[in-house]
Image (spheres, rainbow, N blue to C red):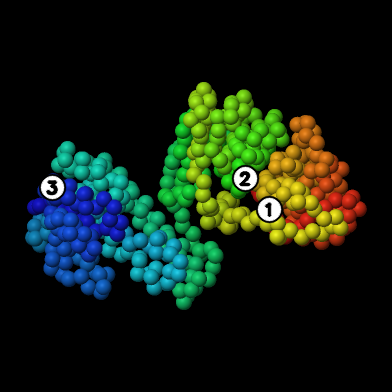
Amino acid sequence: MKKQALISVSDKTGVVAFARGLHELGYHILSTGGTAKLLTQEGVPCQEVADYTGFPEMLDGRVKTLNPKIHAGILARRPDPAHMAALAEHNIDPIDIICVNLYPFEQTIAKPGCTFEEAIENIDIGGPTMIRAAAKNHESVAVVVDPADYAGILEEVKASGEVTAATRLRLAKKVFAHTARYDGMITNYLTKLDDNGEPAADFPAVLTRQWVKVQDMRYGENPHQSAAFYRESTVAPGLLAGYTQLQGKELSYNNIADSDAAWECVRSFSSPACVIIKHANPCGVGIGVDSAEAYQKAFLTDSKSAFGGIIAFNREVSEEAAQHISRQFAEVIIAPGFTDGARAVFEQKKNLRLLVVANGGAHNDYDFKRVGGGLLVQTPDIQLATENDLRVVTKRQPTTEQIADMMFAWNVARFVKSNTIVYAKGGMTLGVGAGQMSRVDSARIAAIKAEEAGLSLEGSVAASDAFFPFRDGLDVVVDAGATAVIQPGGSIRDEEVIAAADERGIVMVFTGERHFRH
């Protein structure tokens, strides 16, 4: 019996070199459709599956590999004499390597204007059947779905005449993960449609997702909890999970959680910005002409809380910025890049983690929150009011400077745990009050933070992530020195609060949007 490999791929990356390598190692190549045409054009001998089985492709190619001669060659257990005798009786050779990747369903449904018919046509049937069969029989068959595995397989066959048992098992695991993801995408797509195949829901009736483990963590939020970090199979530019770690200790569970909070906040600014995060909350945010100025502003807000924090930049970190940062203890520094001078400064702190994350506008499609026995799913909070959305509700009108400060504070507020009050002025936070059960207490805490930092709140603006249900919270921020307030509006007591703002002679604007964060 001759050695055989069946190669039929949608993604043809590296397939010619792989097929040529197998041919040179003595494998008879079976193929179909576009793959067979490509191999022939490139001078790699191969046999069409239809010629091998003696049964023509039919139904527009829907039936080609679904044939006993193919599947018997895949599923026959080589150590089982009865199986091998059955192959010999029917003149079937074993198929030792299956190289198949599936119709591009994910890419198809992502195309603008993709029709239901197009989506259905890109559901692969023969491919999943073959690779599942091969994975089940990994005792005897190597199955390849990822071009990244081609080179390693050729090396093993050259070295020992076959793919090793350990590799066959590893490849089989990869297959079942691959088909699970593929079927999950189909399920997600179809269960968002009505019975006529038309879009009917924002969320699928059955939600299936897949993440790939990056690392086991030393522990979770607390030492008595175990944890691991997973990322999606494809991470779009701009998302934290695509990070590259340049130096430092292994990231912890809390490091990653806080780094995400820092990165999401800092990348929301168009100007050079710095965000310092402590326990998932910004304790200082600043914008400036460069990373050094932005950091200095952010650090001034709450230098005490910044100790042991996560620091994120949306611009390359300069040597000057690195020199300032090196005077404090930080856990993680995140940026799109670091100058050579900055790298040299940070190399003196061996445990300090440096992460490079590509700038980009991608966002998660869904946010998740686990509850007992269930999952809350929502779209991400990426809406942000613009200046044109602001509605001035007081007699006093805002100045240009106040509008800029209010927009800055409003953006920061949506990244702070509710209830939230943020004081700001001149492109920096002056005080941040986070996570209190009472908005009044958040306002007081933010003012205390400013006082401890030696920062005056006179002439500042205050942002509240949700409306003031009574005037007491407004009075606290005005007493602290704020002369302008930005808030969503929408309370049944809006008129009472507006009247209080007019009484105190301040500016107040409504955004029409709320930014709770739990």
Give me the C-alpha separation between circle 1 and circle 3. 62 Å
> Residue 170, percent across and down?
30, 44
Residue 49 placement, left or right of 398: left
- 109, 177: nearer the viewer: 109
Asked if the residue at tag 2 contacts the one at tag 3, i.e. Cβ–Cβ closer than 8 Å, the answer is: no
Question: From the viewer's perspective, is residue 191 above or below residue 85?
Answer: below
Residue 228 placement, left or right of 155: right
Give me the C-alpha separation between circle 2 and circle 1. 22 Å
Q: Name the residue type under label 3.
A: Glu
Disc 1 packing (10 Å; few <14; some 14–19; many ≥20):
many
Q: Is residue 451 visible?
A: yes
* For marks 3 and 2 on the same chain, the one whose residue lies earlier in the sequence: 3
Residue 320 placement, left or right of 72: right
Q: Residue at x 21, y 52 (%)?
A: 16
* For marks 1 and 3 on the same chain, the one whose residue lies earlier in the sequence: 3
What is the secondary structure assignment of the residue under circle 3?
helix
> Residue 107, percent across and down?
40, 61
Q: Name the residue type under label 2.
A: Ser
For mark 3, what is the residue? 24
- 412, 150: nearer the viewer: 412
Q: Name the residue type under label 1.
A: His
Residue 312 placement, left or right of 458: left
